[in-house]
Amino acid sequence: MTDRPPRPLTPAPLAEPEPRTEPLTELLVQLPKAELHCHLDGSVRPATLLALGAEQGVVMPAATPDTLAAYMRVDDARNLEDYLARFDVTLSVLQTEAALERVAYELAVDAAAEGVRYLEVRYAPVLNTRSALDMHGAVEAALRGLARAEQDADVVARVLVCAIRNQPPELALDAARVAVEYRHRGVVGFDLAGGEAGHPATRFVRAFEYARGHDLACTCHAGEGAGAESVRDAVQGCACDRVGHGTHIIEDASLLDYLVDRRVCVECCLTSNVQTRAAASYESHPFRAYFDRGMNVVLNTDNRLMSGTTLVDEYAHAARRLGFTLPELARVARNGFASAFLPYAEREALLARLAPAFDAVVREGRAGAAVEAGVGMQVTA
Ligand SMILES: [Zn+2]
């Protein structure tokens, strides 16, 4: 393992949202996508935050959807912990079943409008138990919202239950128990989130063992706020099936090979990593290097609100800043469906149903090559 690269002293500038009418954006909306790393409490509509605040008598830090969106978008984080502090705002109004059901519904519907056909929504239900709710109620409310979204939009949506690194390992075990209880009712996996530095995943090995011992899939935030050794903790110490972020895997060539060879899925989040300084810039993000080495990588938003992004924006960043071609992005999208924690037969069925849409997007991309050349988009592999 090598030393980490020096961090910039000033935050790297974040990209402005992409214009919505360009051919590239249209194609990326049409491309069927699976999002595996998306936090419920980080992906609330600004207008909904204001509405929930008004209903519950909680004052929000800004008064209009636009100013609240700007406040919530973390442009000045020094590290992951700074970024996580914004979650106090969303969590302040996510303590009722009605609020959780609403934000889960809206997130899945919004994702569907971006062309997300499979969504794994994650959150830590223990953080929704400040007033009357218990963890069961918190899980059931989100599941209801997602089920309703499945009826109204073309999306399949499931839940990952998170435990929090900064909390005692016993609470993580409680979360794993709740996740297992809902294993056949919409919860498809268990995750460890929160401040990574100083809180190794192996402290929570009993929670992972419990989940895995009850045949529940596991992922873990690792290699984001700490180095590649944290990814070893997650994958080798806790036998996690996927890795959240994994930005610092690039520092350990042997581990990188191991993950490539085992086909371990790494859930990459470009904008979020630039914000937390896990990556110095979009251009220097290791996502391109991972893909070129044959790693099973998937693009994700992490948090639509705090990162001021959409999944279409993240794919567009990969195209424009990391030179991804449309067929390459289609492969990334397929990786997402293939690595979902949905049962294998359901993944296969989804991919089969979406095959014509994949083909159409790549075909259309080729036909529009001349137009896209103007914005630097390569459409051939
Ligand atoms: Zn995350």
Image (tube, grey):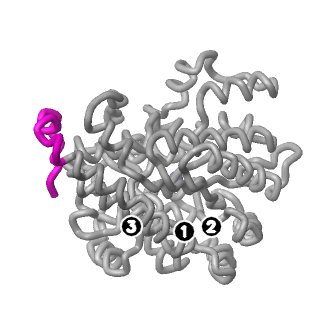
Q: Tell me the quarter of the picture where residue 99 sits.
A: top right
Ligand 1 lies under 8 Å from the Cβ of mark 2: no
Q: CA distance from mark 2 to mark 1?
A: 6 Å
Camera-side residue of 282 and 24: 24
Give the extent of the magenta segment: 366-381
Picture quarter with the N terminus? bottom left
Please give the residue where the numbered disc 3 appears in the rendered image.
Answer: 228
Please give the residue where the numbered disc 1 appears in the rendered image.
Answer: 341
| Residue 217 x, y percent position in the rendering | 58, 73
Q: Is the residue under label 1 in contact with that under label 3 (CB below 8 Å)?
A: no
Q: Is the residue under label 1 in contact with that under label 2 (CB below 8 Å)?
A: yes
Q: What type is the residue that disc 3 sits on?
A: Ala
Q: CA distance from mark 3 to mark 1?
A: 24 Å
User: Among all residues in the image, which is located at the extreme right?
Assistant: 132
268 lies above or below 250? above
Q: Judge left or right: residue 24 versus residue 196.
A: left
Camera-side residue of 85 and 241: 241
Please give the residue where the numbered disc 2 appears in the rendered image.
Answer: 188
User: Among all residues in the image, which is located at the extreme bottom?
Assistant: 213
